[in-house]
Image (spheres, rainbow, N blue to C red):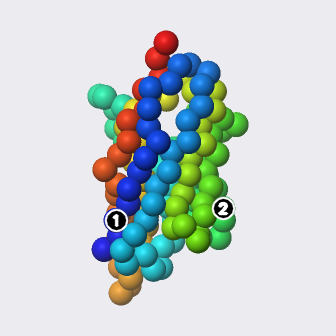
Amino acid sequence: QVQLMESGGDLVQPGGSLRLSCVASGSIFNILLMGWYRQAPGNQREMVATLDKGGNTNYTDSVKGRFTISGDSAKNTIYLQMNNLKPEDAAVYYCTAVQRTRGLTFDHWGQGTQVTVSS
């Protein structure tokens, strides 16, 4: 089992910045991809950014140029640097890890961290 613990969510003014962190622990082998999703009230959960084991990144269009996903394998941690935050970025941000084991693929999720963007 993989445990994911997010941190870094906060209240920030529009135009501000935050850095989210996600620490993975437990049976962290054969992780194919890690990433960040978000869900605002009344909306479906959406992909924000992903980082695969080859170092390739993917972003949803609305955050390109403002958000950066990165990882530190020594710390089993991924980050999401969020700059120029907008009110529409407000959501609960979830960390995810996709793991392949015994021929099956598992999606693991953290509990989420709240990002509020308001003046």
Q: Position of residue 57 (x, y in %)?
A: 64, 56
Q: Nearer the viewer, residue 79 or 49?
A: 79
Quarter of image, res 42: top left
Q: Nearer the viewer, residue 104 or 35?
A: 35
Identified at 31% across, 28% down, the residue is: 41
> Which residue is the site of mark 1?
3
Quarter of image, res 70: bottom right
Q: Label 1, label 2: how many angstroms apart (C-alpha)?
A: 23 Å
Is residue 14 shown left or right of residue 102?
right
Is residue 68 shown left or right of residue 91?
right
Task: Kindly report which numbered mark, 1 or 2, lies closer to the viewer in this rendering.
Answer: 1
Q: Amino acid at mark 2?
A: Asn
Q: Quadrant of the N terminus?
A: bottom left
Disc number at residue 72? none
Q: Position of residue 19 (x, y in %)?
A: 56, 42
Identified at 60% across, 64% down, the residue is: 72
Disc number at residue 56? 2
Q: Position of residue 7 (x, y in %)?
A: 43, 47
Q: Note whether residue 41 is visible.
A: yes
Is residue 34 shown left or right of residue 39?
right
Mark 2 packing: few (<14 Cα in 10 Å), some, or many (20+)? few
Q: Position of residue 43 (x, y in %)?
A: 34, 32
Q: SS class of the residue under badge 2?
A: loop
Q: Note whether residue 38 is visible.
A: no
Say above or below: 55 vs 8.
below
Q: SS class of the residue under badge 1?
A: strand
Q: Amino acid at mark 1?
A: Gln
Say above or below: 91 vs 96.
above
Q: Earlier in the sequence, mark 1 or mark 2?
A: 1
Identified at 38% across, 36% down, the residue is: 114
Mark 1 packing: few (<14 Cα in 10 Å), some, or many (20+)? some
Identified at 36% across, 31% down, the residue is: 40
